């Protein structure tokens, strides 16, 4: 296996991470740049809108509740504490406990999962969050004393670089923030989705609300985070509805929506994995699922402007807008060959467990190389078949002809 093949999943994950992470980062950077350069304008505009932080969090919590995003509901509760504490005078000890407790709580939310709102799960999650605040109140003073010898050199370095930094945030709180951000970033990279992305930004920005005592800054940040929560809920729900969970390509529902955007000229390609039921019966459904993922990934990379959807089972639909059947044939043939030429390595039997104490080298399990093939039926829009359903039926007839003609081939509909 080449280095490029090995790195491909990592590069794909990194690309998706960047597409998800950087738009909110750029948005918040631009928002805060405008805020700090036009502080007086923002103060005059926001002076009577203090209630917006509570309303926006309530709306975000209700939306998250309706969609079963329990962690975002708890995140709204944490931000509510941040907003409420701006109107309440706290002792320095309670401020430290609030700061560290919120950091720990957001890290906990990032590493946990949505468990719904049953009474047991609700009580358990709230108890964990309360425990984190209690532990912060009890343990943080001792941690500050214990870490002082390690943080003193950093204090001196920061004071030399910029004495104003230590007047804004202590070195201990800075270390807590950096540690929490690194832990959150690792989790976000491993589990990249809109919910984790929103929680990560809430983790970092809640700390900055603590650092900047200006209530207008806190109001602007909380309203923006509440909007990000709503967006993440709707975006994840859209992805669940319109993307196939197994193959990670658009689903049948997405196809039906995409059809409405097509013009008068387009081609439909129906594809089917050959002997898939026999393959499933021979090697098991787990291997069958991996084959479905493989074929879907190959079809998803088809060139020529085609868009691939999982229609159901082992069937896939490819739509080529603004192209005729003759024009798409080279692209379909290319993807057919890429699937047929791909070697799938199957382990002959499960890997034997490694003994706890042994110096002997274990012989790796033998691998069996198998191949899968796909058949294709191609049909384009004509005057006789103007609607998508009839075009797809013609593609299905052509697919049946490909199956009957020996499989692993492409057949054009007789139009």
Image (cartoon, rainbow, N blue to C red):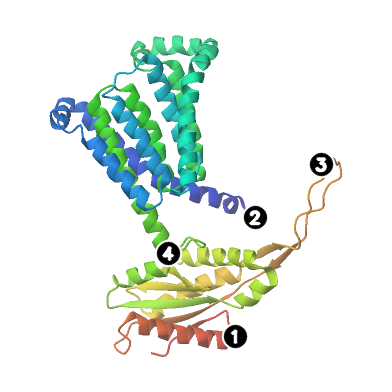
- Marks 2 and 3: in contact by CB < 8 Å? no
**Residue 155 or 413: which is nearer the viewer?**
155
Q: CA distance from mark 1 to mark 2?
A: 31 Å
Q: Residues within 10 Å of mark 1 (few under 14, many from 20)?
A: few
- Marks 3 and 1: in contact by CB < 8 Å? no
Position in image of residue 46 (x %, y %): 17, 31
Q: In the structure shown, which secondary structural element does the residue marked by tag 4 occupy?
A: loop
Q: Residues within 10 Å of mark 2 (few under 14, many from 20)?
A: few
Q: Residue at x 39, y 43 (%)?
A: 72
- Marks 1 and 4: in contact by CB < 8 Å? no
Quarter-of-image position of residue 59: top left
Q: Is residue 160 above or below residue 370?
A: above
Question: Can see residue 63?
Answer: yes
Residue picked out by circle 4 = 250
Q: In the structure shown, which secondary structural element does the residue marked by tag 2 occupy?
A: loop
Residue picked out by circle 1 = 406
Residue picked out by circle 3 = 356
Mark 1 or mark 3: name the one nearer the start of the chain. Answer: 3
Q: Residue at x 33, y 41 (%)?
A: 24
Mark 4 or mark 1: name the one nearer the start of the chain. Answer: 4
Q: CA distance from mark 1 to mark 3?
A: 51 Å
Q: Is residue 333 above or below residue 159?
A: below
Q: CA distance from mark 4 to mark 1?
A: 29 Å
Position in image of residue 350 (x %, y %): 75, 58
The N terminus is located in which quarter? bottom right
**Residue 400 or 108: which is nearer the viewer?**
108
Residue picked out by circle 2 = 1
Q: Is residue 85 above or below residue 354?
A: above
């Amino acid at each position: 296996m080449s280095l490029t093949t090995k790195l491909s999943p990592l590069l794909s994950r990194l690309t998706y991470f960047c597409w998800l992470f950087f738009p909110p980062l750029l948005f918040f950077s631009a928002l805060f740049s405008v805020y700090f350069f036009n502080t007086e304008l923002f103060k005059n505009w926001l002076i009577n809108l203090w209630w917006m932080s509570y309303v926006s969090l309530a709306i975000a919590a209700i939306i998250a509740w309706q969609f079963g995003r329990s962690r975002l509901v708890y995140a709204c509760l944490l931000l509510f504490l941040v907003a409420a504490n701006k109107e309440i005078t706290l002792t320095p000890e309670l401020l430290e406990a609030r700061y560290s407790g919120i950091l720990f709580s957001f890290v906990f939310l990032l590493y946990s999962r949505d468990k719904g709102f049953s009474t047991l799960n609700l009580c358990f999650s709230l108890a964990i969050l309360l425990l984190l605040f209690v532990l912060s109140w009890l343990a943080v003073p001792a941690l500050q004393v214990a870490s002082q010898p390690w943080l003193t050199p950093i204090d001196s370095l920061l004071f030399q670089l910029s004495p104003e930094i230590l007047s804004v945030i202590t070195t201990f709180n800075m270390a807590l923030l950096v540690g929490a951000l690194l832990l959150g970033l690792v989790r976000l990279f491993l589990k990249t989705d809109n919910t984790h992305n929103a929680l990560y930004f809430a983790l970092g920005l809640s700390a900055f609300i603590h650092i900047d005592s200006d209530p207008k800054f806190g109001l602007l940040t909380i309203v923006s985070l509440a909007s990000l929560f709503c967006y993440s809920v709707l975006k994840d729900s859209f992805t669940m509805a319109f993307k196939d969970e197994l193959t990670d390509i658009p689903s049948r529902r997405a196809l039906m929506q995409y059809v409405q955007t097509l013009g008068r000229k387009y081609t439909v390609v129906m594809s089917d994995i050959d002997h898939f039921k026999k393959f499933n019966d021979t090697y098991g459904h787990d291997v069958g699922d991996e084959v479905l993922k493989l074929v879907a990934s190959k079809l998803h990379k088809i060139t020529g402007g085609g868009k691939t959807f999982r229609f159901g089972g082992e069937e896939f639909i490819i739509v080529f807008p603004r192209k005729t059947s003759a024009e798409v044939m080279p692209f379909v043939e290319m993807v057919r060959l890429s699937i047929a030429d791909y070697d799938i390595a199957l382990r002959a039997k499960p890997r034997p467990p490694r003994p706890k104490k042994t110096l002997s080298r274990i012989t790796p399990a033998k691998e069996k190389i198998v191949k899968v093939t796909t058949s294709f039926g191609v049909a384009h829009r004509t005057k006789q078949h103007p609607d998508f359903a009839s075009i797809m039926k013609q593609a299905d007839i052509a697919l049946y002809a490909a199956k009957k003609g020996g499989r692993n081939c492409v057949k054009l509909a007789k139009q």
